[in-house]
Image: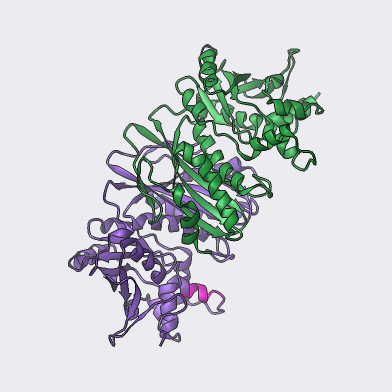
Chain colours: A green, B purple
Amino acid sequence: MDEFGLIQRHFQDLTSARAGVVLGIGDDAALLQVPAGYELVVSTDTLVAGRHFPHQTAPEAVGWKALAVNLSDLAAMAAEPRWFTLALSLPEADEAWLSGFAGGLRALAEPHRVALVGGDTTRGSLAITITVLGLVPAGQAIRRSGARVGDLVCVTGTLGDAALALRRLDAAAQGDADLMLRERLDRPTPRLAAGLALRGLASAALDLSDGLAGDLRHLCAASGLGAELDPEALPQSPAFAELSRELSGDQRFELQAQGGDDYELCVCLPPARLAEAQARLAALNLPLTVVGLMQAEAGLRLRYADGQSSPITATGYRHF
Amino acid sequence: MDEFGLIQRHFQDLTSARAGVVLGIGDDAALLQVPAGYELVVSTDTLVAGRHFPHQTAPEAVGWKALAVNLSDLAAMAAEPRWFTLALSLPEADEAWLSGFAGGLRALAEPHRVALVGGDTTRGSLAITITVLGLVPAGQAIRRSGARVGDLVCVTGTLGDAALALRRLDAAAQGDADLMLRERLDRPTPRLAAGLALRGLASAALDLSDGLAGDLRHLCAASGLGAELDPEALPQSPAFAELSRELSGDQRFELQAQGGDDYELCVCLPPARLAEAQARLAALNLPLTVVGLMQAEAGLRLRYADGQSSPITATGYRHF
């Protein structure tokens, strides 16, 4: 495999001149300009075939998703993406696959004006590591550690779509609802505009990649707090509601809070700021739903409508 | 495998506060400060077990080398490294291996004051992708494209040590010379100080990872020029000279110019600047050897002592 040829043929138009690129792909390193008054924001995520996406995933979806999960991390910091590097491990230099993969990257990189500035291709089992670089005005990033007791725990969009899609992957019948769920699994939308809109409002945020329950634990730990969640409040898409009808409440909770791959934002907001935050996201056609409350007591609990509460453990959620 | 536990246990002391780190590992992304007047320098390289290093390589050497090959790219740009991200794919969470690997990273990261600011660990065959971030005063990076006709082609250090080590990997007897060569294969020294010392002198540079012949072609292409090399001028270490005695000139040339893994710098210098460049590198105990000449005619040629020349092809070097 000729690494240089590969990159040039398929990734050329991802490297076109963008703001701040002094020198792009083709030298030992890229040279980039970070404007005064901004902090550089950096995140790295790897996707491995068979672990982070099904082996039969279309190459376009693999390219899209590899960039999307990285952009999602920047969204959670309220940062704007600028540049990325791509380390691609491939079993063979399959032209059709590469063309599709690059097309998927481009479909997300172009509208966000994110430029490919470096990369490496190696022969091996399919895996993609992207490092994304972005900018945020100094001091304005939203961190995991800023939550306060009494903050509302909110999530953007809907939860559980990707997890239900994965569960139904081998189902014979694929109706419209299944296709909608599959789109959420294959082409998650990084909530970049939402992240920017929440600057100055949110006290803490992270992106939901492993599932709300697990991810919220990280936010709680970083903030030195605990939280309670209302399992009935987790927002469902119409497709999820339709296709999860025959499931138990436990099963639905597992998909929505422990399934992962949502790539929505989990945001902590002082109650007085909720209306403004919801109004800003409504302007983006994105719901922002209150699903819980930050509390002083460490750990994660479920609070039911009947007033009872129970701790959430790794193996399930209502142990009584 | 618990990614968070892994990173915390073994990589904690690689993430200690360094200049410019506003927020390190533990959030969705790191926040970094790029000082005014500097350009950000970014490079990504992947090492795959069995392709970029032998399977039996000690974990310390794998950690060292994974960072070294990335630092080498920054050296070639005359940049100073500051931060890096690590994407680690591992077949299993082997404590001893991880401890050794982190120790190897630390042995190189500490003296260069390079901080780990992000990462991702996944289960898979052993592969390491590092993205290194550094700084260079605006406009002072050394590029591949700046060479001029008449520039001397120079290399730092010696060539062929790692390639000969690889060739002798399974040899039964391992004397001092073999150990020296093996050290060059396992723990290449990124020529960061040399890169800085050549700022303002070198017209072009790149680092030698695939072998002088192939890498110099990239520099020639970027500069729109060609070059001739003197095969007898390629610098040999005492260990290489000792252990390559029984080899033919062709074999020696192949090891020194086409073997790869040297991680020396190839530098173009106007003749009037050679003495100053050699004096600066002598202060670093590093030889700088003239091995060729940049020419207007495209392509790469060998020039022999008898005045004859021949093109270098991918399959060999003296076809007559």
User: Where on the picture, by quarter, is residue A260?
Assistant: top right
Q: Position of residue A179 (x, y in %)?
A: 70, 36
Q: In the image, B41: left or right of B126?
A: left
Q: Residue furthest front?
A: A176
Looking at the image, is A159 positioned above or below residue B273?
A: above
Give the total number of marks visible in the rendering: 0
Q: Position of residue A198 (x, y in %)?
A: 49, 23
Looking at the image, is A85 positioned above or below residue B153?
A: above
Magenta-drawn stretch contains B263: no
Looking at the image, is A190 positioned above or below residue A319?
A: below
Q: Position of residue B218 (x, y in %)?
A: 38, 64
Dividing the image into 4 quarters, which one contains the C terminus of chain A? top right
Residue situated in front as seen by the camera: B237 or A231: A231
Q: Is residue A317 visible?
A: no
Write the residue at 35% across / 81% down.
Answer: B310
Q: In the image, B119: left or right of B37?
A: right
Residue situated in front as seen by the camera: B233 or B287: B233
Magenta-drawn stretch contains B165: yes
Residue situated in front as seen by the camera: B111 or B280: B280
User: Where on the picture, by quarter, is residue A256?
Assistant: top right
Write the residue at 56% across / 17% down.
Answer: A151
Q: Is residue B255 visible?
A: yes
Dividing the image into 4 quarters, which one contains the N terminus of chain A? bottom right
Write the residue at 61% across / 28% down.
Answer: A216
Q: Position of residue B82 (x, y in %)?
A: 38, 46
**Which region of the structure is painted magenta?**
B164-170
